[in-house]
Amino acid sequence: MFSHSRLFVSVLAASLTAVQAATEWPLTGAVGPTTTTAAKRAVICNVLDYGGTIGSSDIGPAILSAFTNCVQTAATATLYIPPGSYNMETWVTLDDGSHWALQLDGIIYRASTTSGHMFVIENANDFEMFSSNSAGAIQGLGYECRNAGPRLLRMVTSTNFSVHDLIFVDSPEFHVIVQTGSNGELYNLAIRGTNLGGSDGIDISGANHWVHDVEVTNRDECVTVKNPANNLLIERIWCNQSGGSGIGSLADGTTIEDIIYRNVYTNGGNNMMLIKSNLGSGYVQNILFQNFIGRDSAYGLDIDSYWSDETPGTGAGVQLTNLTFQNWDAEIVSDTRAPVQIICADGAPCTDITLSNVNMYVESGTAVVKCESAYGTGACLKASGTTSYAIVTSTIALPAGYTTPPTLAGDLASGFATDSSIPIPTIPSTFYPGLAQISPLAKN
């Protein structure tokens, strides 16, 4: 287990280069492809040479052909989708490729309601999916088949990969899923979903991943950690009219540890951070949540071990230990919702929970915070113990350390309607007030 002292010593630097990030806790080594983009261009597998056309009614078969007949026959290669518009009816699973890239410089439009995923990248090694013009996009047109069509991208058990400089818009369901794997980097992404649940931005599990410089609009998960996960660094995240970031939902057999969320800005969120479970078993431990800013959020910090939307697990509860929340400023819009709620399972009380410089303000000027079976420092937490206790509350006034949260120029006043098309945005260059993006856009 990592101690608080080690955790804080290693994370207080203001910004990281990719090289620094690869050597700094919680990352355990390098992330992203192991060969350069230029090296992968030794062979160009252009979909227009494999049956595709700009304006195609179904670019899927040409993508599959280029992968099978070109990428998989070359030592290194780039599957290239040039600028232009393409419809897609045939979903693609691109499996077992090594030392390759998928360069999407055009815009792909969903043209079928078949379930599944438009793109599955599986068992890839040394892989990069990107847009060289920072304008490549997948437009899901989810308003036509809401919660009844495909997801956009799923990365499955892949290693040494990156996904960057892409735009994902209006998936009928989830947008981007990273299913386990290791050494991944996701950055410079814009995700625009509808104002409805089931529109997850990024759901990520696995080991040694770095997610940074991402904007998400939706009404569900922003950037959320799923089980199992360890050694993740998630930073400079802009939840812009979103459900907010989180960990979960958690159930039986949870193993999540050694994670940093930092420099997370939430505008108009359901939550700033939600850790959700309903009984279950396993653990979440050694997590730092640092430098969170919130404006007009319904809830702030919410740990809910009796999450009613989830089927109860068979265990007594997921054990939460050594979670630190540091430097939070937030404006919560509801006077009736607790800006800090730490509700832990009676059968698995939370321990070593630390709130440091957490300043949450509600419109009325006073708020009630809630704790149950939770131990640590701050809010209504009990100082020590391991046994359960019933919900306790305390009233807080405007904190002395509170400052009015800053804004970003692209803050949205509301989410996007469920029954009309969502426009394709541009990828921003700032994702957290006062901090530049870590990696420049590819077009620059």
Image: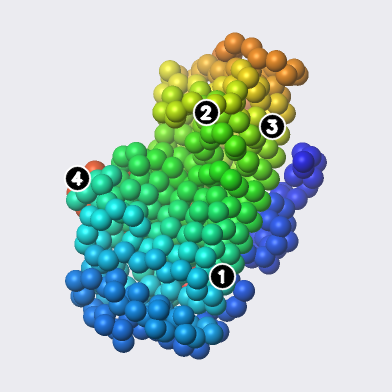
- Residue 70 showing in the rendered view: yes
Q: If you read the primary sequence from the N terminus, does the residue marked by circle 1 or circle 3 appear first?
A: 1
Which numbered circle lies on residue 419? 4
Q: Identify residue type, mark 4.
A: Asp
Q: Quadrant of residue 21?
A: bottom right
Of residue 396 and residue 154, the one placed in the foreground of this image is 154
Going 63% across and 41% down the picture, which residue do you hit?
255
Which numbered circle lies on residue 321? 3
Query: Local crowd at mark 4 within 10 Å, few (<14), some, or many (≥20)?
Result: some
Marks 4 and 2: which is nearer the front? 2
Coordinates of residue 297 in the picture (x, y in percent)? 43, 33
Helix or strand or loop: what does disc 1 sit on?
strand
Going 73% across and 19% down the picture, which residue do you hit?
386
Coordinates of residue 247 in the picture (x, y in percent)? 54, 39
Query: Local crowd at mark 1 within 10 Å, few (<14), some, or many (≥20)?
Result: many
Q: Identify residue type, mark 3.
A: Thr
Of residue 267 and residue 204, the one placed in the foreground of this image is 204
Measured Cα–Cα span from mark 1 to mark 3: 34 Å
Query: Local crowd at mark 2 within 10 Å, few (<14), some, or many (≥20)?
Result: some
Which numbered circle lies on residue 125? 1
Q: Are marks 4 and 1 in contact (CB under 8 Å)?
A: no
Q: Are marks 1 and 2 in contact (CB under 8 Å)?
A: no
| Mark 2 lies on residue | 313
Q: Identify residue type, mark 2.
A: Gly
Q: If you read the primary sequence from the N terminus, does the residue marked by circle 3 or circle 2 appear first?
A: 2
